[in-house]
């Protein structure tokens, strides 16, 4: 039927999609490339990501020399680089607490964080109730620490909380701020896929709005393993799933996480899901199998059938199966038969379902195996490519072939089966807890039509907890943008709305992903800063005056949301003809500069731009604590502080500009020296110039007749910095005195209101408090008096220590003055490129300094997309108690500067006994110790009196070790009685004793 869910277009299907669950985010640390895209590419190439350790590496890792030299020790593992590194500062965890945390707890925090980021979910966000389901392997790390500790109760308590499964889900919830239920799910190898099933049920029952499933697998130390004849671990160190040469699995290290939400809750703004969970099922084999550790065809078949029923799909629609795939000669055929039967019964055609086996590539990730398999299957249905089974050579002859729906891909192949693409994922735990999940590619989004037009400038915001991480993230983002070229609006929306703003920040503007990538890689045009931990600094708005105007000066601010609206409101306060001329001057870069340099147009234009930009900036969340304007900019400052109503400010600035323009023309010269010295030089040269402004101890402006200003500039030459202002009149000089009567008349029609915030005044160089009623004549006489801007800045610095100045107007003439007064400054108009809107750069700079900019507006609209996650790279953290200095290291490869590594012990230490003189005595004692009973009859069947497949492998190991022989596994399985085992040992020992010296 036709279903619409708000995110996707109408999808015609026979299924009811109301119970479907979307996978919205995922993250992982698996053996192989750390980047998930690169890891997926390695899967398509069939790469094996295991490591064969050298003897030196084993000893350095802490493997005892006798164990490493044991002929049954296999020095191979699915290796995870940097297993011991953890960014504990990021999660605000003490170094000592980190040392006592099992690495699995650490990995799960990091992959959980990045999975949520991948889903566009901001940590500590209460808009959705998020539950946590976490699974981990038993903590070998904790056992190592316990062996090396003095059993201090406080230390052991910390150790338990940092390593036991009970606390991992709640730790994730606590550190990331998740308010839903938090559970540990432990069913051995199927743990994390069972957790997925439970999370799905919780979403469907309404227990949560979102679920985070995390799994990890690790054995400490990360090294090889002891192969037991007849056991599940490979003797060759290669996992060959479904292969003729299969002899078992190898262990691996890793962690993975997925984020789940109801498909019906996905909105247009959410990232496109990786895929959809259609149904899932779990069960247990019960006792209908050979032993506790044995797999069951019936149980696996039932769980796959139940998942198909729950998903309401037939087997003919399944094109891929991510198998449990341990690579054992017996387990593989059992799984193959169960899956083939279930799928065939559900309608799958012969040879229609490709089989995948992740363990052949990365080893068995134990509790994380299920979620890892799910991640791989999701990449299959998302990308439409089926990876080969890594290392496959020849089909296991025990796998059924007749009418079988399963086949083994030997190379990467495109999906050619049914659509939408559907796949199954299996995970089977020791003890018989089976899980199966059915997934489907995400329904396609409806793509909105994009009009052909120049892309707008956008603001890209990136943050991290430390500068090094920020650099790594900038590099990762640059590489991602370069290789994927995503829509820049989606990139900006993801970073602004789907990531937590951390203290170290970077902002950059651009119009395309390629442009941003290039600038990030070169760190060109980038603003960087640190958000204060004590909160945002108080902000001072600074407004420039005459001489800073330029044609088209409004254009840089049009990228600010709300600026055009605020500008229109300002222009509406002026008479229509004047407003239209102002609009032309503000937007047209080719407007006659000479006309704009005259006070009648320059002052209203500067006021309009400054007031509108200040309004837009306040709408973005940046609120001034105090204001100050330079010359005519003081009218803008007073209007922002509520002293003038907008209409009154427009009236007065118009009168101010016109009355000054009616005065005799003149000029102004900025000079890089103190006012007293500048005046003395002018007087020495017989020039009648006035001090128009004192901008600092070494900066002033002289004004007067143009010819005298020209002469002054000529005589000064290169002695000081000098700059002629772009202005037709000499403000604040004796030439302006004729304007005073007209200004007084205009002011008489205006009602001034008390200031809503402190203002630093030009006439006095002092700060007046909020609530002050300013005198009317101040704004009249201000045009003739010197502008004491430097003193005003000094007063602001004293009044608001630690403040940040924001210059609002064309260019940045006031920012150096503020910085000279000890006030950090950001100019809203960065003037980087006249062809590019630059006010967004100023907003970005404010954000990097911790100002409360509302990022959704300046970054622009767009749905969230997939971007690289947080770049974790903390220090190595291993508890000293877990480390034991290796012994007898004669290899030159040993590095004495390397910290000592842990020494593992067998899970259950075997008793040290001398070689038994009599096989009957020795075998009987071993039976008694393993079975826990002394009264075993000689004709007792080992399995009938409590033994199982795992215990008999330990029995064989004990026999071989204590008697110094190697008994045939098959013979011990065939001769299952005590007397039979004694006979086998007696025969093999006799043959060994009779062999010639040196024979093998």
Image (spheres, helix red, strand yellow):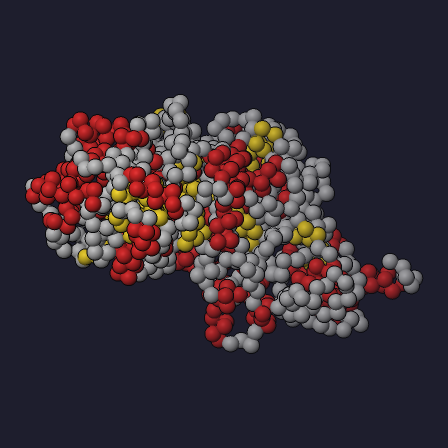
> Quick check: can you spot residue 899?
yes
Q: How many marks?
A: 0
The x, y position of residue 60, in whole percent, is: 69, 63
Closer-to-camera residue (597/399): 597
Residue 24 location (% of width, % of height): 43, 41
Q: Splitting the image into 4 quarters, where does residue 585 fall? A: top left
Q: Is residue 924 above or below residue 54?
A: below
Residue 685: x and y, percent?
33, 48
Q: Quadrant of the C terminus?
A: bottom right
Q: Is residue 803 left or right of residue 489?
A: left
Q: Is residue 615 visible?
A: no
Q: Is residue 536 left or right of residue 731?
A: right
- Tell which of 186 and 900 is nearer to you: 900
Q: Residue at x 63, y 44 (%)?
A: 361
Q: Is residue 983 left or right of residue 563?
A: right
| Residue depicted at x 32% and y 44% | 669
Estimate the x, y position of residue 213 in percent, counting from the top left. 45, 49
The quadrant the N terminus occupies is: top left
Q: Residue at x 51, y 37 (%)?
A: 518
Q: Looking at the picture, tell me which residue is in the foreground, 129 or 484.
A: 484
Q: Image quarter for residue 983?
A: bottom right
Question: Is 68 rendered above or below residue 325?
Answer: below
Q: Residue furthest right?
A: 996
Q: Is residue 524 left or right of residue 785?
A: right
**Foreground pick, 685 / 664:** 685
Taking the spot 65% from the left edge, 67% from the top edge, the residue there is 900
């Amino acid at each position: 039927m036709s279903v619409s869910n708000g995110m996707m277009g109408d999808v015609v299907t026979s299924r009811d999609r109301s119970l479907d669950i979307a996978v919205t985010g995922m993250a992982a640390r698996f053996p192989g490339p750390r980047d998930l895209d690169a890891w997926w590419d390695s899967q398509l190439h069939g790469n094996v990501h295991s490591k064969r350790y050298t003897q030196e590496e084993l000893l350095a890792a802490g493997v005892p020399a006798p164990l490493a030299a044991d002929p049954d020790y296999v020095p191979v593992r699915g290796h995870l680089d940097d297993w011991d590194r953890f960014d504990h500062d990021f999660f605000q965890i003490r170094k000592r607490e980190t040392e006592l945390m099992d690495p699995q707890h650490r990995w799960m925090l990091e992959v959980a964080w990045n999975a949520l980021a991948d889903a566009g979910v901001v940590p500590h966000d209460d808009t959705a109730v998020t539950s946590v389901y976490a699974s981990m392997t038993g903590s070998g790390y904790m056992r190592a620490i316990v062996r090396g500790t003095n059993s201090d109760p406080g230390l052991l308590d910390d150790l338990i909380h940092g390593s036991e499964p009970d606390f991992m889900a709640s730790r994730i919830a606590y550190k990331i701020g998740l308010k839903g239920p938090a559970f540990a799910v432990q069913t051995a190898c199927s743990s994390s896929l069972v957790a997925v099933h439970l999370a799905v049920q919780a979403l469907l029952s309404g227990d949560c709005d979102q679920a985070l499933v995390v799994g990890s697998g690790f054995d400490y130390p990360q090294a090889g393993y002891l192969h037991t004849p007849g056991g599940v671990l490979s003797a060759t160190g290669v996992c060959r799933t479904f292969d003729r040469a299969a002899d078992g699995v190898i262990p691996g290290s890793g962690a993975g996480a997925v984020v789940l939400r109801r498909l019906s809750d996905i909105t247009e703004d959410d990232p496109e899901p990786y895929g959809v969970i259609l149904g899932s099922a779990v069960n247990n084999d019960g006792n209908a199998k050979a032993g506790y550790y044995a797999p069951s065809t019936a149980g696996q078949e039932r769980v796959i059938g139940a998942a198909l029923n729950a998903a309401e799909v037939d087997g003919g629609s399944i094109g891929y199966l991510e198998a449990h795939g341990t690579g054992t000669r017996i387990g593989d055929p059992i799984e193959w038969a169960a899956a083939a039967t279930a799928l065939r019964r559900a309608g799958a055609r012969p040879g229609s379902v490709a089989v995948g086996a992740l363990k052949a590539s990365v080893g068995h990730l134990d509790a994380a195996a299920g979620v890892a398999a799910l991640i791989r299957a999701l990449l299959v249905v998302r990308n439409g490519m089926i990876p080969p089974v890594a290392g496959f050579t020849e089909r296991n002859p025990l796998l059924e072939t007749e009418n079988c729906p399963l086949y083994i891909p030997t190379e990467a192949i495109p999906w050619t089966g049914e659509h939408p693409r559907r796949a199954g994922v299996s995970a089977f735990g020791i003890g018989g807890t089976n899980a199966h999940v059915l997934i489907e590619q995400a329904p396609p989004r409806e793509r909105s039509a994009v009009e052909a037009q120049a892309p707008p400038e956008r603001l890209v915001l990136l943050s991290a907890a430390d500068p090094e991480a920020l650099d790594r993230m900038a590099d990762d983002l640059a590489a991602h943008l370069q290789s994927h070229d995503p829509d820049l609006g989606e990139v900006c929306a993801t970073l602004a709305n789907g990531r937590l703003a951390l203290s170290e920040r970077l902002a950059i503007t651009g119009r395309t992903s390629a442009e941003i990538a290039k600038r990030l890689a070169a760190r060109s045009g980038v603003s960087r800063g640190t958000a204060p931990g004590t909160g945002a600094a108080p902000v001072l708005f600074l407004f420039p005056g005459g001489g800073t105007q330029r044609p088209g000066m409004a254009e840089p601010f049009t990228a600010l949301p709300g600026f055009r609206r605020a500008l229109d409101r300002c222009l509406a306060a002026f008479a229509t003809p004047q407003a239209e001329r102002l609009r032309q001057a503000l937007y047209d870069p080719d407007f006659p500069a000479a006309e704009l340099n005259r006070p009648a147009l320059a002052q209203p234009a500067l006021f309009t731009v400054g007031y509108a930009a200040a309004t837009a900036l306040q709408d973005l969340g940046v609120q001034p604590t105090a204001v100050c304007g330079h010359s005519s900019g003081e009218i803008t400052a007073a209007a922002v502080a509520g002293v003038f109503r907008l209409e009154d400010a427009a009236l007065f600035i118009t009168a101010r500009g016109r009355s000054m323009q009616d005065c005799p023309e003149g000029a102004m010269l900025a000079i890089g020296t103190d006012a007293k010295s500048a005046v003395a030089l002018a007087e020495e040269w017989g020039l009648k110039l006035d001090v128009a402004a004192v901008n600092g101890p070494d900066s002033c402006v002289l004004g007067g007749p143009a010819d005298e200003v020209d002469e002054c500039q000529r005589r000064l030459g290169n002695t000081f910095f000098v700059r002629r202002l772009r202005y037709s009149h000499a403000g604040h000089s004796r030439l302006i005195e004729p304007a005073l009567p007209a200004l007084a008349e205009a002011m008489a029609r205006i009602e001034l209101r008390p200031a809503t915030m402190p203002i630093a005044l030009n006439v006095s160089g002092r700060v007046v408090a909020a609530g002050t009623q300013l005198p009317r004549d101040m704004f009249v006489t201000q045009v003739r008096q010197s502008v004491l801007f430097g003193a005003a800045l000094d007063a602001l610095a004293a009044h608001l220590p630690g403040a940040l100045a924001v210059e609002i107007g064309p260019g940045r003439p006031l920012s150096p003055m503020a910085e000279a007064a000890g006030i950090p400054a950001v100019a809203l108009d960065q003037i980087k490129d006249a062809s590019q809107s630059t006010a967004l750069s100023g907003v970005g700079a404010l954000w990097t300094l911790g100002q409360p900019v509302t990022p959704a507006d300046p970054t622009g609209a767009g749905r969230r997309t997939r971007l690289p996650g947080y770049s974790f790279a903390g220090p190595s953290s291993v508890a000293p108690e877990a480390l034991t200095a290796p012994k007898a290291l004669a290899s030159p490869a040993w590095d004495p500067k390397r910290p000592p590594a842990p020494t593992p012990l067998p899970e259950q230490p075997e008793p040290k006994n001398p070689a038994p003189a009599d096989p009957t005595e020795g075998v009987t004692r071993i039976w008694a110790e393993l079975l826990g009973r002394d009264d075993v009859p000689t004709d007792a069947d080992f399995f009938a009196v409590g033994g199982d497949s795992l215990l008999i492998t330990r029995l064989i190991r004990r026999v071989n070790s204590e008697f110094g022989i190697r008994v045939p596994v098959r013979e011990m399985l065939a001769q299952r009685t005590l007397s039979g085992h004694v006979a086998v040992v007696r025969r093999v020992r006799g043959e060994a004793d009779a062999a010639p010296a040196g024979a093998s």
